[in-house]
Image (spheres, rainbow, N blue to C red):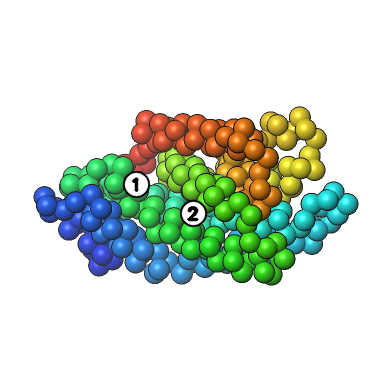
Amino acid sequence: MSASVREAGGFERAGTSAETGAAARLLALGRAELALLSRNKTALTTAVLIPVAMAFAMKGAVEEMVSGTGLSAGTVLLPATLGYVLLFAVYSSLTSSYTARREELVLKRLRTGELLDREILAGTALPSVLLGLVQCVLLVVLGGLVLDAGMPTAPHLLVAGVVLGMAVVVGFAALSSVLAKSAEASQIAVLPFMMVSLAGSGMVVPPDILPERVASVLELLPLSPAMELIRAGWTGGEGLKETLGPLLTGLAWTVLALFAVQRWFRWEPRR
């Protein structure tokens, strides 16, 4: 195992103690990954700053798009910003982490210890997910004041959307890492999912201003259900039926992604 990983927080200890519980193993792996993430200034800066920068960059365009539609720019832009967090702070960062750990033989070595495959994947994802959740909380509180969107009127829908979105992007991050031969190449591998999500899941163009047929197709994209629930956190949703649909669609994508990861995820370097 590489010296940087050993120094970062004890991956080897997490996989060698027969008495270590699953929670303790996950925490040990998560601490090590957090240490590595904190040392990667480029990845950390990208994860923290890009969502906010994109929100400011899109503010004028969103205000112009919703003008005369009856929509509030704040309740369109703030949910979109949470979507940027899912894509940049979690999905892109985690795809790079999975790829780098695989190419450094860390994943292969972890599998020889006590850790289960799902614990390795979850422990590696833990820092990115926690960072994303912290950003979401701060954006909901501070962004609501800056963008005059107010606090969510249906916080349970917002929480459901964020949790569902996290599950989807973690699954797709593991799956996208299969396409990358190196951590650098992972920045290319993430582009298809990111571009489709940005363009079609309501982060750039609000689905409310699109033709109904187009919107009904785009709502089937992987991140669209999560984004719909996040927006409903401010709008209040339209009823149980309208809320249950996105939830079931998002869960279906999560199950499909996890099945694909179980089937095709690569634990050893690509040659």
Q: Which residue is mark 2?
A: 90
Q: Residue at x 35, y 48 (%)?
A: 122
Mark 1 belongs to which amino acid?
Leu
Pinpoint residue 256: horizontal percent, then vertical percent: 46, 31
> In this rendering, does residue 187 appear at all?
no
> Residue 234 in the image: x percent, y percent?
66, 53
Whole-number angstrom distance, CA of label 2 to CA of label 1: 13 Å
Q: Tell me the quadrant of the picture where the C terminus can be found.
A: top left
Crowd rating for badge 2 (residues with CA inside 10 Å; few <14, some 14–19, many 20+): many
Q: At x 38% / y 55%, what residue is drawn?
A: 126
At x 71% / y 65%, what residue is drawn? Answer: 147
Above or below for 52 versus 237 = below
Mark 2 element type:
helix
Q: Amino acid at mark 2?
A: Val
Local SS, label 1: helix
In this rendering, would 202 be left or right of 115? right
- Residue at horizontal 57 percent and vertical 34 percent from the top: 244
Return the residue found at the far left: 18
Q: Position of residue 222 (x, y in %)?
A: 57, 38
Residue nearest the observer in this picture, 129 or 194? 129
Point out which mark residue 121 bears.
1
Q: Are marks 2 and 1 in contact (CB under 8 Å)?
A: no
Location of residue 162 with respect to 48 vertically, above or below: above
Q: Nearer the viewer, residue 88 or 144?
A: 144
